[in-house]
Amino acid sequence: MRRTPLAALLSLALAGTALAAGMSVKDEMKTVVDPATNTIFAVGGDVDPANGPDAAKVPASRWAEALAASTKLKASAADLVGPQKQPGDVWTKSAGDFARLAADAEKAAQKKDGAAFSKAANDLGDTCTACHSKYKKQS
């Protein structure tokens, strides 16, 4: 059976998230979340209609990257939800928002909806910043 490039990317994304189960929060952020969000933030800028008419001309391969990263992030977010990773209401809310926004990004990438994907990426960035201000030790 011959796989399409999109199917191959999704398979890799899902395989990577399966490995994330059981990781520490720090390791999961470094190996799964950071690379996925970097892709989402970059593609979010590429496809944002506010950035001009070229936003609509993003190649299918870039959308496939966005979808794979969003899928990976959604699975990782599901792993981070709940007090088993960090105690407290702020963690629970931030992880829930993270999961919802990753799902929003995934849906927008599936539809190749630049405005919705860009909004999900921006909102995801805000959620990450708020959570990091509480939980990530700044050096």
Image: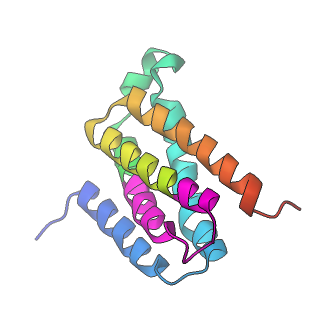
Place of residue 19 in the rendered image (x, y in percent of width and height, measured from the top left): 45, 80
* Residue at image point 54% right, 38% down: 123
Residue 78 covered by magenta stretch: yes
* Residue at image point 50% right, 32% down: 46
Place of residue 111 in the rendered image (x, y in percent of width and height, measured from the top left): 26, 37
The colour scheme used here is rainbow
123 displayed left or right of 130: left
Residue 35 found in image quarter = bottom right
| Label total for image | 0
Image quadrant where one finds the N terminus: bottom left
Residue 120 covered by magenta stretch: no
Which residue ends up furthest to the right in the rendered image?
Answer: 139
Image quadrant where one finds the C terminus: bottom right
> Majority secondary structure of the magenta segment?
helix
Measured along the vertical axis of the image, is residue 87 above or below residue 115?
below
- Magenta range is 68-95
94 displayed left or right of 133: left
* Residue at image point 63% right, 71% down: 87
Residues 86 and 66: in front is 86
* Residue at image point 41% right, 58% down: 74
Place of residue 132 in the rendered image (x, y in percent of width and height, measured from the top left): 71, 55
16 displayed left or right of 34: left
Place of residue 57 in the rendered image (x, y in percent of width and height, measured from the top left): 37, 25
Which residue ends up furthest to the left in the rendered image?
Answer: 1
Which residue ends up furthest to the bottom in the rendered image?
Answer: 22
Residues 92 and 40: in front is 92
Measured along the vertical axis of the image, is residue 4 above or below residue 43?
below
